[in-house]
Amino acid sequence: MLEIGIRVAALILGVGIVLRTFLAAITTFVLPRSSPDVLTRMVFLVVVRLFRLRARTLRSPAAREHLMAYYAPIGLLTLPFAWLTLVSIGYMLIYWGLGFGSLGDSFVLSGSSLVTLGIERPAGLLGAGLVFSEAALGLVLVALLIGYLPTIYAAFSRREAAVTLLEVRAGSPPEAVEILARYHRLGRLDRLGDQWAVWETWFADVEESHTSLAALVFFRSPVPERSWVTAAGAVLDSAALSLAALDIPYEAQAALTIRSGYVALRRIAEVFRIPFDPNPKPDDPISTTRQQFDEACDRLQKQGLPIKADRERAWRDFAGWRVNYDAALLGLARLTLAPDAPWLVTDRRI
């Protein structure tokens, strides 16, 4: 009776492992919404810890950046191997629970079925059905990854196109002050609304793609000084500066872009359980200091941009905008080990 009970428990556990693994694959690659999966998160956490152990031995920032560039692709390719391993273990327990030989025999049968070698074939219709289902499931898991790689890289390409174009307007690394200064030098301060509209759309696209395909968050830009996180921060800061400090007509599109930006950053932060206050007060503390803000205003004023006379009110307005995205932005910068950028203060310990 005890052996029968153990085999039944193994059968139930095996079915649960197989179903849970298939659900993880569906959630990660098919479900068109933000629904983080524990198995997927565990795989990426294990991979990133291994990478960070190696990164601690590298003294050069360039070498660490080169190493971390491989993290997301390797983590993504590790997923199907983890899933296939779990499926193999699950079916091994199922075969053993149903009495298809010893654990060793069940392991060989499961491995043979999963990789479609066919070196072991169980007798009976039930055994054949299980073998066929395992082989089909293995092919489906691999096909899911292969089928969604083009989707992932298409979203990555869209994201990086805007990040690359930002270097022309904001320098490298991107800087909010430089965006406004360059627009002023070109006599296009009245066209800032066009820039904000482009980035409002960009934030919406990034939110959709980086919550449904969370691995995209870790894909690094081709150029080490660039990052989608620092680009987002520069654009949001420049919009906040223009609304708070520049003595120009109010631009509603800037406010819309800031809202689009902090909503996107918060949604992505939620996927990775980065803490932030969903309802911050305008006077809550932020990472940007008053001194940094005054220095930015002084630089803009020296380059001929019109700055509001009431600097205290301008600082309060800027802080009121920045508080909406400050915690999510810094959390994502730490998570992705984003490169240094003005006003982006992150913990650099690896």
Image: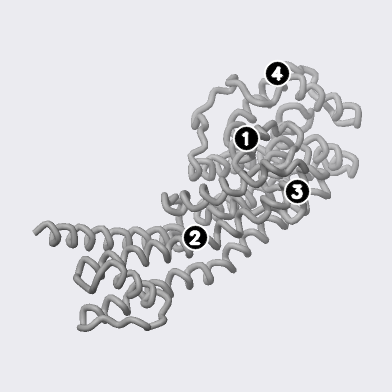
Quadrant position of the C terminus in the picture: top right
Between disc 2 and disc 1, the foreground one is 2
Quadrant position of the N terminus in the picture: bottom left
Asked if residue 340 is positioned above or below residue 81 in the image, the reply reads above
Callout 3 secondary element:
helix
Q: CA distance from mark 3 to mark 4?
A: 44 Å
Q: Which class describes the residues within 10 Å of circle 2: few (<14), some (14-19), or many (20+)? A: many
Nearest to N terminus: mark 3 or mark 2: 3
Amino acid carrying mark 1 in the image: Leu
Q: CA distance from mark 4 to mark 2?
A: 51 Å
Q: Which class describes the residues within 10 Å of circle 1: few (<14), some (14-19), or many (20+)? A: many
Q: Residue at x 65, y 32 (%)?
A: 347
User: Pointer 1: what residue?
Assistant: 330
User: Pointer 4: what residue?
Assistant: 313
- Between residue 129 and residue 50, name the one nearer to us: 50
**Colour style of the rendered protein structure:** one colour
Amino acid carrying mark 4 in the image: Arg
Q: Which class describes the residues within 10 Å of circle 3: few (<14), some (14-19), or many (20+)? A: few
Give the percent coordinates (x, y) of residue 306. Answer: 84, 28
Task: Give the total number of marks visible in the rendering.
Answer: 4
Q: CA distance from mark 3 to mark 2?
A: 25 Å
Q: CA distance from mark 2 to mark 1?
A: 27 Å
Nearest to N terminus: mark 3 or mark 1: 3
Q: Residue at x 48, y 73 (%)?
A: 143
Nearest to N terminus: mark 1 or mark 4: 4
Instruction: Identify the image quadrant of residue 26.
Output: bottom left
Nearest to N terminus: mark 4 or mark 2: 2
User: Pointer 3: what residue?
Assistant: 63
- Residue 79: which numbered mark, if any? 2
Amino acid carrying mark 3 in the image: Ala
